[in-house]
Every structure is written in structure tokens, then in C-alpha cells.
Image: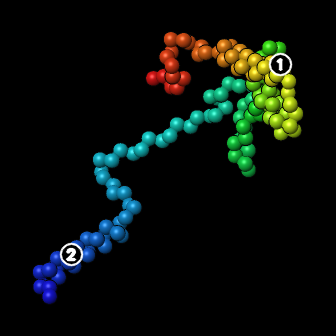
Amino acid sequence: MTGPEEDAQRAQEDAEFLSIVESYGDRPTFPDDPEPAPEPVVDPGAVLEEPAELAPTWDGEDGYVPPPAPPVPRPQGVRAFAWFGLFGVPVLVLLSTLLTISLPSPLTLLLLAWFVGGFGYLVATMQGPDDPDSGWDDGAVV
């Protein structure tokens, strides 16, 4: 059994809870609250100084339309030979294995040397960072 004091306290708690629920989401206003500053309007075309064919465009229907991607550079000369050694030789060996074609030992040794040499050449000619004093991390610099 509950007494009249407990019933009065429960009614007061219910009223406070109901007032919290009714005002959920409302932001109280205070007289000392400053007005929020308006956001500055920035023209996207003024920030980017790109040629017209590379500038991003805004389509009313689809939104942002990115500029076309530049073509993929093709390796030339020794680099193309090294890339074929790295990817073409394993494909040739796999095909010869699947087709049960027995490769002569000198050819197998030559293909192995081509694969290892191509990998070594590509690693040796990799370009490092523009600034070698920037450290090992290519991330953001504060």
C-alpha cells in the first residue's frame, strides 16, 4: 500500500517526465544567446582555376559530374619488358601447366630469370618521395 505522500511524489515525477517528453527537441532560448553568423557564400568556380574541360560541372538532375579521367600511361621500352616479365611469365607458366606442355629446362630457367629480373628492375627504378627529408609517412603534414 502506498501512502498519500508517495502518491503525491509519484504524480509530481510523472508531471516532470511528461513536461520533458513534451519539450523534447526544443532548444531553449536565452536572452544572452548571440545570433548565429551567416555562412559565407563561396563560388565553386572562383576557387578552382582549371581549364574548362577539366573543371567539375554541376548537373541539376544528377548532381556533381566529375571531369573525365586522364588516360592511363603506357610503359615504354625496358619498363614494358619488365612488366611483362612480372605478369606475363606466370601466365605463360600457368598455361603450359594447364595444357600439360613440358617446357625445356633452359626455357624454364630463362622465364624464372625474366620474372625475378623484371621484379628487381621495377623495384630498383621506383620513384621515392619528392622531398626525402619529409619522413617515411606520405600522409598529412601539420
Asked which quadrant contains residue 41, the reply is top right
| Disc on res. 33 | none
Question: Disc 2 and disc 1: Cα gap in Å?
Answer: 95 Å
Residue in the foreground of this view, choosing between 101 and 74 = 101
Q: Residues within 10 Å of mark 2 (few under 14, many from 20)?
A: few
Residue 14 position within the rendered picture, expressed as x and y whole percent measured from the top left: 26, 75
Q: Earlier in the sequence, mark 2 or mark 1?
A: 2
**Image point (37%, 57%), residue name:** 27
Secondary structure of the residue carrying tag 2 is: helix
Residue receiving disc 2: 12
Q: Position of residue 24 (x, y in %)?
A: 37, 64
Could you tell me if residue 39 is visible in this image?
yes
The residue depicted at 11 percent of the width and 80 percent of the height is 5
Q: Are marks 2 and 1 in contact (CB under 8 Å)?
A: no
Closer to us: 65 or 130: 130
Q: Position of residue 72 (x, y in %)?
A: 78, 27
Residue 133 relative to residue 29: left or right: right
Type of the residue with mark 2: Gln
Query: Where does label 1 land, which residue?
Result: 106
Q: How is the image coloured?
A: rainbow
Q: Is residue 82 visible?
A: no
For the point 81% across and 31% down, which residue is it?
A: 93
Residue 108 in the figure: left or right of residue 127? right
Q: Quadrant of residue 100?
A: top right
Q: Is residue 36 left or right of residue 11?
A: right
Kind of residue sitting beneath label 1: Pro
Left or right? Give the position of 60 relative to 96.
left
Element type where label 1 sits in the image: helix
Name the image quarter holding the N terminus. Answer: bottom left
Residue 7 versus residue 66 in the image, above or below: below
Residue 92, compared with residue 122, is above or below; it is below
